[in-house]
Amino acid sequence: MAHGPDIPFWSIPAGEVTRRLDVRADRGLGGQEVGKRRAEYGFNELKKEPKKPLWKLVLEQFDDMLVKVLLLAAVVSFALAYFEDNSEVDGLRAYIEPFVILLILIINAVVGVWQESNAEAALDALKEMQSETAKVIRDGSRISDLPSRELVPGDIIELTVGDKVPADSRVVKLNTACVKAVQASLTGEPVAVEKTIDPVPDPDCELQLKECMLFAGTAITTGTCVAVVTGTGMKTEIGKIQEQISQAAEEEADTPLKQKLNEFGELLAQVIFYICVTVWLINYHHFLSWESTPGSSLPNLSTVTFSLGKCTYYFKIAVALAVAAIPEGLPAIITTCLALGTRRMAKKNAIVRKLPSVETLGCTTVICSDKTGTLTTNQMSCVQLVTLGALPGELKDYPVSGHTFDPDSGSVTGLKKFNKAVEAVAQVCALCNDARIEWKSGTFRGVGAPTEAALVVLTEKLGVPDLTEQQTIVSKRKSDPENHPDGATLAYAARFKRRAVLEFDRKRKSMSVLCANAGQSKNILFVKGAAECVVERCSRAMREDGSIVPLDDKLKKQILVSVENMAKKALRCLALAQKTDLGELASYDGETHPGQKTLHDTENYAAVESDMVFVGLAGLRDPPRPEVRQSIAECKEAGIRVIVITGDNQITAEAICKDIGVLSGGSVAKGSSMTGRDFINQPRSKQVKILSQGGGVVFSRAEPKHKQDIVRLLKDIGEVTAMTGDGVNDAPALKLADIGIAMGIAGTEVAKEASDMVLADDNFATIVNAVGEGRSIYNNMKAFIRYMISSNIGEVASIFFTAALGLPEGLIPVQLLWVNLVTDGPPATALGFNPPDLDIMEKPPRLRDEHLVTPWLFFRWMVIGLYVGFATVGAFVSWYMYERVLFIDLSQDGHSTVTWDQLTHWEECPTWEGFTVSNYTALGQTFTFPDPCDYFDEGKAKATTLSLSVLVAIEMFNALNALSEDNSLVQMPPWCNPWLLVAMSLSFGLHFVILYVPWLAAIFSIVPLSVNEWMLVLLFALPVILIDEVLKYVGRQLNRAAKVKLE
């Protein structure tokens, strides 16, 4: 038996196919042969990939630089806490920090594992598309319910209306005149494809053109046929798609956000390492000393002294500094900000499945969009109607408005008076039709073939001749659409009784119904079909007054010109006709009538449908969504290119793209429109040139592999690509794209599971809104990163200044952890609610490799951070050295002041003679010092509290600075983000709680502050706003200069 994926069964005659597969169509395979083939080809099922073990998923969550830095900090903190000899309370306090950091990392890992576990659900959804049973002929016997997984190549299967195709098969026999299959899930084209037994000449043709093949997972909508299985399991088109999804999953790269955060983590790790080493080395003289050899600068090794205790102490300070530099809450805040973004986007019909995708949208440079259902409504509509007028040779052209299956959403423009020709058109549309419309879930839907559903809607828009009856029909539909969706169609159906159906076939390209008129004795034939074929078989035509005139060559030519004009606009043109001179069929009333012999043979249908009366033309298409053109214009304004990749034919795709503005009007520029096959056959350099050119591009007749190749190439040339799709054929490209966007209404489960985002309304405009939201989220993310990092640099600067100047430890690790996680958390989260800039969609997308931290931004962080360090240390020193600072009296608590030299050499206190200090109070609490040197240890509680409070206050004011990167607080006042004001109040409230609740104050080693002391806090904190206003002004000037230079 000759069988393999390389044999083009579609280009071989049916007899040759069965011969190569060594099977007879009337007997099928024998039991022994089935066993041999199953041993060779396996079961007809998709391959099950081994699932990634849980331990591996968990480890992958820690493969992130920022997470590694946090993990290292937690381990070092835990080690210091374990080996340090502290009191029980201090010991427990030392464990708080590593415990909290580990808790944050565990929560992040759990979320990551949960997301990863759902990532491969696309493959499971793909398996559900496979048919469960099949009708098979084996050993000459018919098996009606053979499990589909048992099929092998060469099996003979029978398929009828409603059946799901169980495996890729070659049609070998048509049992009815017409067999159609819906392949939209594989090709994206919504119209059912007519199947034939004839081979296709081109062995390399597109999937949609393989009209003699049936594909696994598609469904039969019309007719019955016999086919031979040519491919099973992974050798089917669905199997190839699974393989492509798996390959795409392996090619998935980190999102731009993850890349930037990794870069940021690496930078942070380096900075922390250098700072820690520097601080440790600056203080080397405290734990390492020696005397020089006489007459030389070299050390005398015999005089070297080393203090392990002090060395450990300063190492602990260096670790505290590292903890201060690490934004412990950053992963949680980023996740929260992205989650808030997903909520806002969900309200705009964009449902995000993977959190980082929210930000990825913000830097999208290319949107690769499917046509059907995304740019168009996926609801076939009649947009043009042509009938004869009253004058000789006159054709009346009526535009038809409305783009959905809702009859009341449009009308026939220019139809002032209902006439006989229009009535004849309505009769043909209503009666020569097996579709209907229904009201379901708040919208009108087509049931049956989309083309026929569009003709039902046209009938409803045309209405019935009697005005009162028409008003009643419309009134009932508006008041009760569920029970009265198609009143006009039913009214026409009530006047006629269907006697017979002359099915569509490929030769005459038409179908018709034989009906009995309730008011007349003779039957009438209503016909619709391909315009050229139907017009050719018409000999007469109906004018608007109902009179019948000869269809001479001149009039026929006029009609065909209208047909040609519709074709140029990519409309599907149907001609409508009727016939009353039916001979013996005029009285046909059932199978016992003599005319049954004529109807039994389909070869007679063309003769029956001849000498007809032409009544009109209907131009149909899947119209563009009304809002799409504006959205395309917004994309151009935002610097985003739109590339359309569709399975539809080239003429239709070009026409739609011209309508919506993807292609400019007039002639299509070279390289702007081509088939997927033509593009793939180009050399790579030419492909890159086509994809890099400005403006829109449309690829038609695209297959799954073409879509993948286009997306992969776009990513290779540095584009951030969003890909939309709804069918199974789109799943590999959705998986491969930077962000895959599936349709929520028309999309298959496979497409949804492979995507990062799902559109609840299947609307391209929703993508554009989501891009704007993504840009806003990125700006807000930069705002809270700027806020948190500048604050953390301030903490580092504070510890650095303390260590460098030899001051007592001002801020302890548990206080820094409280500030980083609890006090900073609410404002950082609230910055996620910052309103978007008004010109957010007028700026070009940022580059994929744009750094999160630019030199200017780093300089700003350093300026603010150094001021924070100065202010916290300044408040600490001021309490120790001064009784009054400007107008603020600090002496009311009774504390003693010391000199700068004493404060910076506090470790030498035991050697000071006559050093004494007085007791001081803190809102009723008195601090006594039997040992005066304790003044620099337990006695520093008030100074530490001032330092911590300055840090908290500065960070609250710094949150106001983060409302905008460059806009002044005068332009963007605090109340433009009310959530930030609420968050600041909450953070201040939490700080007051730990200050004024005694047992909490004891845990954090702080004391309550008086009004005067709070005035000192504000004196040091408020200038941060003025400093950042100056920096913002400089930033605006730099931006203007860069813009002028660019122009």
Image: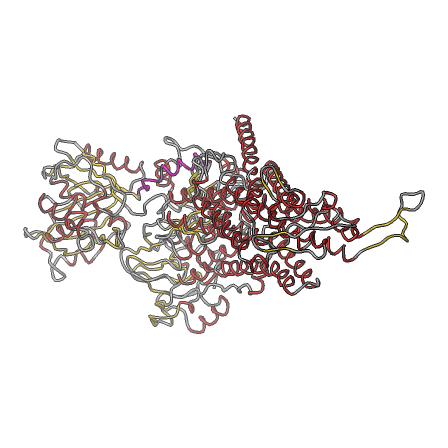
Q: Residue 617 placed where, x, y %?
A: 21, 40
Residue situated furthest right in the rendering: 295
Compared across the picture, whether 412 is left or right of 907 comes to: left
Q: Is residue 348 magenta?
A: no
As rendered, which of 968 and 528 lies closer to the eye? 968
Q: Is residue 705 visible?
A: no
Q: Is residue 180 above or below residue 577?
A: below
As rendered, which of 886 and 616 lies closer to the eye? 886
Residue situated furthest bottom in the rendering: 32
The picture quadrant where one finds residue 131 is: bottom left
Q: Is residue 194 above or below residue 536?
A: below
For the point 78% across and 57% down, which residue is it? 308
What residue span does the magenta drawing correspond to? Answer: 623-638
Q: Residue 507 placed where, x, y %?
A: 27, 49
Q: Residue 559 placed where, x, y %?
A: 22, 36
Q: Residue 132 placed where, x, y %?
A: 38, 67
As rendered, which of 376 and 174 lies closer to the eye? 376
For the point 59% across and 42% down, which residue is it? 889
Compared across the picture, whether 181 is left or right of 879 comes to: left
Identify the image's colour scheme: rainbow, by chain, secondary structure or one colour.
secondary structure
As rendered, which of 700 and 529 lies closer to the eye? 700
Q: How many dots with numbers?
A: 0
Compared across the picture, whether 968 is left or right of 148 comes to: right
Q: Which SS does the magenta portion mostly show?
A: helix
Q: Is residue 172 visible?
A: yes
